[in-house]
Image: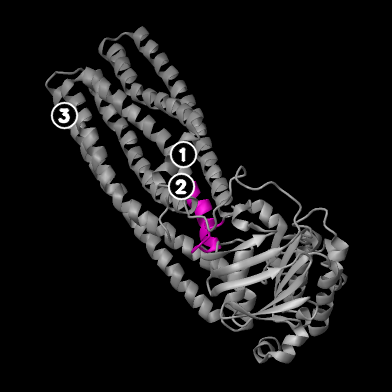
Amino acid sequence: MRKADLPGRNVLWRAVGGQRRDVVVGAVLGMGHQTGEALVPVVIGLAIDRGVVDGDVTGLLLWLGVLAVVYVGLSYSFRFGARAGERASVTAAHRLRTELTARVLAPEGGADEGRLPGELANTATEDAKRVGAVTMALVVGIGAATGLAVGAVVLLRISLPLGLLVLLGTPLLLWLVHLLSKPLERRSETEQERAAHASGVAADLVAGLRVLKGIGAEPAAVSRYRRISQDSLTATLRAARAEAWQSGVVTILTGAFLALVALVGGRLAARGDIGLGELVSSVALALFLMGPLSEFSWVNAELAQGRASAARIAEVLGAEPAVRPVAPSDAPARRRVEGRLRLRGLSYGSLRGLDLEVSPGETVGVVTTDPADATALLHCLARRTDPHEGCVELDGTDVTALGLAELRAAVLVAEHDADLFEGSLLDNVTAARADAPVAAAIAASGTDEVVGALPDGVDTAVTARGRSLSGGQRQRVALARALAADTPVLVLHEPATAVDAVTEVRMAAGVRDIRRGRTTVLVTNSPALLAVTDRVVLVEGGRVTASGGHEQLVHDRADYRTAVLA
């Protein structure tokens, strides 16, 4: 997996910066809340001095009223500050999910390389959530820092030694907490990687469940997932132990620090350096400081996990594109697509200097003796990748000079393993084009037989990935979708491998009739489909080694007969 070009720190800053309004509002209100919390011991101390020590009932009632106002203020500050912080958290996570989805679905591709779909889904959910939580952690952290500062100022006014103890001891304590968060950050990153991998494998197994049952491979699949899940559990437990260890050590350090503050304050009161009310305020402030300091422990844990998740998100967002998109200003002016394809010296994967020309309106079959040649050819025609050498031209223009949206509107590559989507059968057929010639496409692909066998016809609901249909039914619906798109150039890869021979012949005739006058490339070893082409080329060793009519090649070439008749 390539290192991301976009640092994880930038992901964090953009997530926070995008919610700066709510972060600022939440931080200001959090500061108000913590200031109120810090002032409560002070007001109580003043009430004790006036009411208990001086016996001033009016003064006591006055300070009790002030205490009530402080409580109301800190209560509302907490309520609306927490709301702003939570809004910033969920909004930042949502925007990251949207950005990740846009990158994964971007025409230039590359983000899914080396990653399972379930792993990408985990990154877009759990990792985005953890990065979003950093905004809430900042709100809480700023409020806690304010509480510590107010408490320190008050303690300085009460006693210089107490104030200096807090001012000097707090940074040292925070530095130690930061050091303790490093192991948690490393283990959290490992935990997320293992969890994402386990999710990806689970999604992969569920998608292929029917195949696994068919070949009796369930025990092996379960064993594999159990092993990967155990690795994820081990990483999660290690991260949990690191977090628990960090929290425990931080609690011990915090408790020791607060005990020291209380001890110094008690000795000062015993010597008469501070009064009764000031002693109560000092002890109460020492207890209050436990809250902000413990919040720093939580904030550090959230920041550690957020940094680890941000690095993973940055890897996806900064993934190298599979192809370089063309800027709209650099693309040639749009024109009517004639459909002339030309491959010149094409080298990619197993292809070695392949040359091929397809005239406008021609139907050409491509037979490969090595499936890798077909895969490489489809990738180049769909521009899922750029060739190492040579080029693909559409109407005399190198496809790398065309915008990806324009190219894919002109050239549709319908691969053998095309997925269907959840929705009605009609929705799947018209997915590429709302005003598609549905009736003609359904008839040409043989999908009319499927429609007749379903309870609600074209309105029958199709489950995700078409699992409610048989393999042959899925293949015919996928072909209908490709034909309904009605693109100037259509490339079909083995569109009839899961149907019977009679249906295959009907589908071949349907493709020939509906695509008459438009450029069509059939990458297939099916004799029925090759029989309806204008000509066929044979690709061996990554090069075109023969070209001619299907019957002629069957008669003249033993290697061709082996490829299509064996």
Q: Is residue 67 above or below residue 494?
A: above
| Viewer-nearest of discs 2 and 1 | 1
Q: Is residue 140 above or below residue 197?
A: above
Q: CA distance from mark 2 to mark 3?
A: 40 Å
The segment highlighted magenta reads 109-129
Mark 1 secondary-structure assignment? helix
| Viewer-nearest of discs 2 and 3 | 2
Q: Who's the residue at 46% across and 68% down the image?
A: 229
Residue at which label 3 appears: 264
Who is closer to the viewer here, 75 or 316? 316
Q: Who's the residue at 48% across and 60% down the image?
A: 196
For badge 3, the amino acid type reads Val
Q: Who's the residue at 38% across and 30% down the image?
A: 143
Mark 2 secondary-structure assignment? helix
Q: Earlier in the sequence, mark 2 or mark 3?
A: 2
Residue at which label 2 appears: 130
Q: Residues within 10 Å of mark 3 (few under 14, many from 20)?
A: some
Q: Earlier in the sequence, mark 1 or mark 3?
A: 1
Who is closer to the viewer here, 557 or 56? 557
- Please identify the quarter of the rendering in which residue 443 is found: bottom right
For badge 1, the amino acid type reads Arg
